[in-house]
Amino acid sequence: MKRKYSYFDGQKEVERQYNYIPVRYIIAVFITLFEVLAVIGIVGAFCYFVPYFYLAAWATEIFCVIRIIASDDNPDYKVPWLLFVLIVPIAGFMLYFMFYSRTLQKRFVRRLEALKSNTYWQNDGQLFGKLKTDDPLIHSQAKMLCEISETHLFTNTRQEYFPLGSDMHKRLLSDLRVAEKFIYMEYFIIEEGKFWDSILDILKEKAASGVEVKVLYDDIGCMMTLPGNYHKILRSYGIEATPFSRLKGNADSEFNNRSHRKITVIDGKIGYTGGVNIADEYIGETVRFGHWKDTAIRLEGEAVHELTKLFLVDFGINVKKMPSIRDDLYPATDIKEDGYVIPFGDGPRPLYERRVGKSVIQNMLNGATRYMWMTTPYLIIDNDLCQCIENAAMRGVDVRIIVPHIPDKKLVFSITRSFYPRLMSAGVKIYEYEPGFIHAKSYLADDSQAMIGTINLDYRSLVHHFENGVWMYRCESIIDLKQDIEETMAKSIEVTPEMLKTGPFTRFVRSVVRIFAPIL
């Protein structure tokens, strides 16, 4: 279902079509609501009509409180659930049982283990030894990252940094045109338009010529940008396609554990990632919230193997037949480059027992001696990470954070601004990108370390979603990233204490919403 709308792109009026939410999504939401209300209603009825059943409900509530308090979860995540369980009778602990753990289905976990065991082999012991000699602190950080994300340390990987999505677009099309064996693409959002159409034309041509083409897109991320049966349309072109975690109306974690990843792999030799989704605002073809600033990075060489693995794992847990793992998916390379590169994935438990993206950011903050600059569209962080940022600033590190000046979600932006006073009082400098919306997720420390990927400074990215990033040390692209951040800061407004003044009502709303931000 679609409707037409018009907008002005700065030069002329353009007419486009916009997808309504497909019926199956509406049905899935209603099924979920029905499941939740039915369970709560049944338990409530038992408490009312069955003698002494309320004692069992009371005991269950006490059990939930004890379990939440005793869990290893972040206190910021515990507090809203404790409020639910204690303040809302019956419904509170029933919602806890349904949504708190966010565990994945057992069949996904079994498939995951099989996919992980049938992947590329990498002996990086010698490389770690060299890194330890070069810098023991960086060695320990790299070792930890590889351990908690089950990835490897790479060298011999050429990087190319893109300060805008339009720059990435041109390079991506040229790489896709020369694909010989396979093309894998995974994106949170794919939207019909100039960007996607230019890619799809090449994908159809390549699929027809015998190149293996696989496409994975998030089902909720694309609910308003693609038809509900779009994977079937792509299959009619010879493209193997499937939505990630198809929404079915289960009252579990399917609304939260989305794939926010952005990955393209070409022949196992070239890989792309970053913040850029496949939609026209990312390449400046449409204007949404002012100028849309985003970044991406292109890898060529050994490190692409990990991007291939991440894609195959995500694709494999969403299709009926597990994809075959062949030797030609991980080709050898003759590229010789200095610098260390670690592509990595992050996601919910039990796939990742530790918060990978958060650990990378914290390690960079703790190891920085001169500066740590970050760009993020959202700034909604837990107390642990907030303290880490504050500690770096109070240690004398030049900590700067660039966020949008024109928001895409006003309530979220209001919560973002609620963190300004605390961080600024510790010496953190905060900038708002005046031309529009900055969607880039970039982290840079001391001219030597950087991380570019899909990870925002918010709970969705740091806790709930499947994410990915590329950590780099002493790589040439780090200088390009620094130059871009400097140019971005020059176009941004530095937030001053005078800009922080708000009324009591705004402060109250922000306080309430911040309590429940970890579970939203």
Image (cartoon, grey):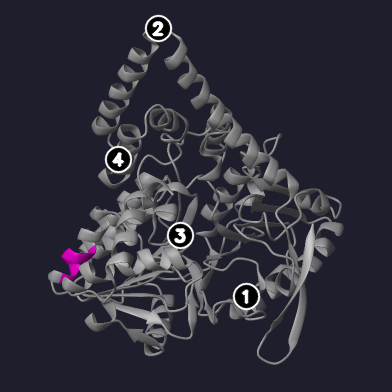
Residue at 37% from the left image edge and 49% from the top image edge: 518
Q: What span is colored magenta in the figure?
A: 389-393
**Amino acid at dot 4:** Lys
Which of disc 2 and disc 4 is earlier in sequence? 2
Which of disc 1 and disc 4 is earlier in sequence? 4
- Front-most of 331 and 303? 303
**Amino acid at dot 1:** Glu
Residue bearing mark 2: 51
Can I make out residue 135 in this image?
no
Numbered badge on residue 469 = 3
**SS type, badge 4:** helix
| Cβ atoms at labels 2 and 3 below 8 Å apart | no
Which of disc 4 and disc 3 is earlier in sequence? 4
Q: Is residue 390 magenta?
A: yes
Whole-number angstrom distance, CA of label 1 to CA of label 2: 60 Å
Q: Is residue 439 left or right of residue 359?
A: right
Which of disc 3 and disc 2 is earlier in sequence? 2
In this rendering, the answer to whether 351 lies above or below 177 is above
